[in-house]
Image (spheres, rainbow, N blue to C red):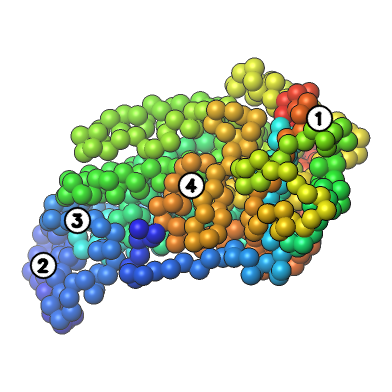
């Protein structure tokens, strides 16, 4: 039963459907082993924004504060999209890469484990 | 119709008061008169139409008369007790303002716990009032009805006395001026707000289990004891007094919650799984709200009372364990996911304070980094893992401050669809990995901080798809604008006054002036 309600066919209003974000999709990004950023970062992004642009224009503004950011060897980085292993195509847009509304992108940067190895 | 119901009631009072002017009515009789007719059976309209909310939750009641009011408190006795407490409280508040009680606290930082309380808890006392009024209106049993109504009055009084008490501090400190507006709008206050919104939009039985039992009985000590003892330890006698004033109601509330749940369980075996799910759900929701308390205890009180870990051991493990032992004969077990808080206990407060430290620009209270001494206390309380995982974090942030680059997280965090806390909780079995859970429902993806929150969503997705998630609302343009300044304006947070670190705040300036004055007086 999807809800207990007085009205027999009660349906809730979906507050975060994609049509409410002015053409954007919401994307969450999590850098594994770097808890200085307490949660995945949430961004409203145009679905045709290239993955390369996400990586080189957007993320450095935030993750760049971490001393590990400059040390990342992107050839070694491993990606997950919505819990599945994933290889991004940097030229293509987010949607073309399969990134959808409220998708979670997680990346691991081998050898980098935060401040003094604390995963911060 | 209504006259016929009311007339005998008034008639009895008139008869008894005129005929027995000299003879005192016994307490028992007074209670009988007070509740007479409260469980009236309708005749012109079907009962289901007059009490529409008692049927839809699936709870089966064989005989409403089986519930007996454990207090049988009469209205005049109730007024007498409460009036006495009010007199004491307001006498203390008077002397507080005459003697500048606000200068007697341990440190200016202490007031930030009151900001959290006033914006996060007091408005929910008011919501508790509304919830119990609803139960009193809908449940067709006189004893439950009158005791729920009395609790509704208690909760209203709690909201009022808290506002009046903490209002004393509003004359001197920032962040307390728009508590009601903040409660409805500010991102982290959506955590307690959504908790109570969830409860009051449930049916009356779920509300009784959620608030009357799970909250009042199982978790209330973990909320009020830390705040009230924290106040006592930090020289805030005004808050201690309202705590005592409310505490005497709690015993009654706990008894009502327990009697109500036993009644529901005894009525029909089909009720057991429904109630068990509510216990699972409200235990988890309550525990998630208590994250704010854990943080308050371990990071915000200038003088600590005990660690969150000790509080959890004493007030949940010991007290709660005995309670669930009692309920075992009904087939009720410990709540689902009850093992998770023990796994999170060493890190919960640190994860929470880390959220507020990095989002201090969007908070209505001040933040700071723990001192070396405070970090020693944390590592003594939480063991060597705390030093390994968290001390480097705070030392690094301290270094950043020193270099003039105080760390702010300028992106918004992903939130849990159910508890609405930023998804900062780590895996129960791995404190270095953020926990992610999700569900796809009607083609839409939803994210959760934990199995507990996911379980709640999956049970009633149509309810939680409607969650007003502050981060998404900002993205949608519903919170005053896209810039931080616009959102702060809309929240009612005064920039550079209410938010940011305690160091350099107007609060700190005020406190230092008082200290200097004391120094001059003493010197
Ligand atoms: Fe209360
Ligand atoms: Fe959650």
x and y percentages locating residue A115 in the rendered image = 79, 28
| Mark sitting earlier along the chain (1/3) | 3
Whether residue A52 sits left or right of residue B468 in the image: it is right
Whether residue B402 sits left or right of residue B348 in the image: it is right
- Which residue is more in the foreground, B459 or B116? B459
Q: Residue at x 68, y 54 (%)?
A: A99
Q: Secondary structure at mark 2?
A: helix
Q: Secondary structure at mark 1?
A: helix
Are both tags, 3 and 4, on one chain?
Answer: yes
Tag 1 subunit = B
Is residue B263 in sight in this rendering?
A: no
Q: Tell me the mark number nearer the camera, choosing from 1 and 4.
A: 4
Distance CA(mark 2)–CA(mark 3): 38 Å
Q: Residue at x 60, y 22 (%)?
A: B382
- Which residue is more in the foreground, B5 or B190? B190
Query: Residue tagged by mark 3?
Result: B60
Above/below status of B11 relative to A101: below
Query: Residue tagged by mark 4?
Result: B454
Q: Residue at x 17, y 56 (%)?
A: B61
Query: Residue tagged by mark 1?
Result: B396
| Mark sitting earlier along the chain (4/2) | 2
Whether residue B499 sits left or right of residue B40 in the image: it is right
Q: Secondary structure at mark 4?
A: helix
| Mark sitting earlier along the chain (3/4) | 3
């Amino acid at each position: 039963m999807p809800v207990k309600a007085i009205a027999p066919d009660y349906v809730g209003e979906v507050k975060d459907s994609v049509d409410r974000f002015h053409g954007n999709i919401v994307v969450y990004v999590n850098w594994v082993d770097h808890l200085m950023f307490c949660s995945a970062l949430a961004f409203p992004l145009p679905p045709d924004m290239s993955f390369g642009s996400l990586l080189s224009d957007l993320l450095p503004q935030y993750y760049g504060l971490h001393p590990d950011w400059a040390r990342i060897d992107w050839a070694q980085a491993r990606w997950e999209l919505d819990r599945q292993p994933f290889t991004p195509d940097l030229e293509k847009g987010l949607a073309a890469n399969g990134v959808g509304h409220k998708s979670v992108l997680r990346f691991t940067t081998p050898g980098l484990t935060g401040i003094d190895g604390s995963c911060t | 119709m209504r006259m016929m119901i009311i007339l005998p009631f008034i008639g009895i009072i008139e008869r008894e008061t005129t005929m027995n002017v000299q003879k005192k009515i016994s307490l028992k009789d007074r209670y009988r008169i007070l509740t007479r007719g409260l469980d009236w059976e309708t005749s012109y309209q079907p009962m289901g139409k007059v009490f529409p909310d008692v049927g839809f939750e699936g709870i089966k009641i064989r005989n409403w008369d089986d519930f007996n009011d454990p207090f049988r408190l009469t209205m005049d006795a109730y007024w007498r007790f409460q009036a006495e407490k009010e007199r004491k409280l307001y006498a203390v508040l008077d002397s507080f303002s005459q003697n500048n009680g606000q200068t007697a606290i341990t440190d200016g930082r202490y007031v930030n716990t009151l900001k959290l309380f006033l914006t996060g808890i007091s408005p929910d006392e008011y919501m508790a009032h509304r919830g119990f009024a609803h139960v009193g209106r809908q449940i067709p049993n006189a004893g439950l009805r009158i005791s729920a109504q009395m609790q509704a009055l208690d909760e209203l009084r709690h909201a009022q006395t808290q506002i009046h008490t903490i209002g004393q501090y509003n004359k001197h400190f920032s962040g307390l001026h728009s508590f009601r507006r903040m409660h409805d709008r500010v991102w982290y206050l959506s955590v307690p707000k959504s908790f109570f919104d969830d409860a009051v939009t449930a049916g009356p039985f779920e509300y009784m289990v959620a608030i009357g039992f799970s909250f009042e009985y199982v978790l209330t000590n973990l909320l009020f004891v830390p705040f009230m003892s924290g106040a006592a330890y930090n020289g805030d006698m005004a808050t201690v007094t309202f705590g005592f004033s409310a505490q005497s109601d709690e015993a009654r509330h706990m008894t009502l919650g327990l009697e109500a749940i036993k009644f529901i369980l005894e009525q029909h075996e089909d009720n057991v799984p429904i109630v068990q799910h509510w216990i699972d759900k409200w235990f988890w929701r309550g525990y998630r709200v208590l994250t704010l308390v854990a943080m308050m205890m371990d990071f915000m009180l200038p003088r600590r009372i005990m660690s969150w870990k000790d509080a959890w051991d004493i007030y949940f493990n010991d007290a709660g364990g005995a309670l669930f032992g009692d309920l075992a004969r009904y087939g009720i077990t410990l709540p689902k996911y009850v093992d998770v808080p023990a796994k999170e206990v060493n890190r919960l407060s640190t994860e929470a304070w880390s959220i507020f430290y990095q989002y201090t620009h969007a908070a209505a209270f001040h933040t700071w980094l723990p001192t070396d001494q405070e970090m020693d206390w944390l590592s003594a309380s939480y063991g060597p893992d705390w030093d390994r995982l968290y001390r480097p974090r705070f030392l690094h942030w301290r270094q950043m401050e020193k270099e003039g680059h105080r760390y702010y997280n300028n992106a918004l965090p992903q939130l849990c669809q159910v508890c609405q806390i930023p998804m900062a909780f780590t895996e129960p079995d791995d404190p270095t990995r953020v926990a992610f859970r999700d569900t796809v429902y009607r083609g839409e993806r939803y994210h959760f901080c934990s199995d507990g929150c996911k379980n709640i969503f999956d049970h009633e997705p149509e309810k939680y798809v409607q969650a007003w998630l502050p981060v998404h609302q900002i993205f949608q343009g519903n919170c005053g604008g896209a810039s931080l300044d616009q959102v702060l304006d809309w929240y009612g947070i005064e920039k550079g006054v209410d938010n940011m670190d305690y160091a350099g705040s107007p609060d700190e300036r005020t406190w230092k002036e008082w200290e200097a004055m004391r120094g001059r007086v003493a010197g």
